[in-house]
Image: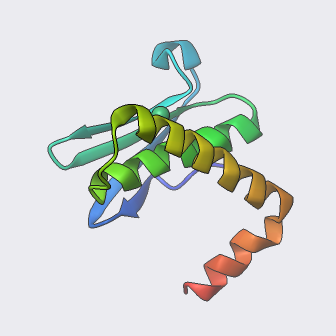
């Protein structure tokens, strides 16, 4: 299954790219911002790690686009914890995402 090509965070469309060559990324994923052009790249690993990384990078996007004031080292700790926590909650309650999707339509 493929992710959406873009998601909206704030007023911006954020591109989502799943990169099959993890070595090319040199890490699990990243969030890049360039004058209003935003891209999340996630290396393809296990499905669970891909979900964790995607939620991690989406949280970076939220912090930056919504201008949440936080030190860089604290931001990394925050997004790591929240990304993994959301991945755990969604994994343990798979019906939750469908329900939230229905609530927001
Ligand atoms: Zn990070």
Query: Residue 30 location, x and y as percent?
Result: 44, 32
Q: Residue at x 26, y 67 (%)?
A: 11
Residue 93 lies left or right of residue 13; in this view the side is right
Task: Single out the residue that lies furthest toward the right.
Answer: 92
Q: What colour scheme was applied to this rendering of the protein?
A: rainbow
Residue 41 to residue 89: above or below: above
Q: Residue 102, how many percent across, how many down?
A: 65, 84
Tell me which residue sits at (81%, 64%) in the image.
94
- Would residue 12 appear left or right of 73 to someone viewing this image? left
Instruction: Name the residue located 26 percent from the left edge and 55 percent from the top edge.
Output: 67
Q: Quadrant of the C terminus?
A: bottom right
Q: Is residue 51 left or right of residue 60?
A: right
Residue 35, compared with residue 94, is above or below; it is above
Q: What is the count of numbered marks?
A: 0
Q: Nearer the viewer, residue 75 or 13?
A: 75
Query: Where 41 falls versus 21 (above or below)?
Result: below
Q: Position of residue 95 (x, y in %)?
A: 81, 72
Query: Within the image, what quadrant is residue 38 found in?
Result: top left
- Residue at point 37%, 61% (across, down): 9
Q: Quadrant of residue 33?
A: top left
- Decide which of 63, 71 is in the foreground and name it: 71
């Amino acid at each position: 299954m493929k992710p959406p090509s873009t998601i909206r965070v704030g007023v911006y469309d954020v591109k989502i790219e799943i990169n099959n060559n993890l070595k090319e990324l040199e890490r699990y994923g990243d969030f890049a911002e360039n004058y209003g052009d935003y891209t999340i790249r996630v290396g393809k690993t296990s499905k669970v790690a891909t979900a964790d990384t995607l939620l991690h990078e989406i949280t970076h996007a939220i912090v930056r686009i919504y201008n949440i004031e936080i030190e860089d080292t604290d931001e990394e700790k925050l997004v790591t914890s929240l990304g993994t926590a959301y991945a755990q909650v969604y994994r343990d309650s798979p019906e939750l995402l469908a329900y939230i999707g229905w609530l927001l339509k």
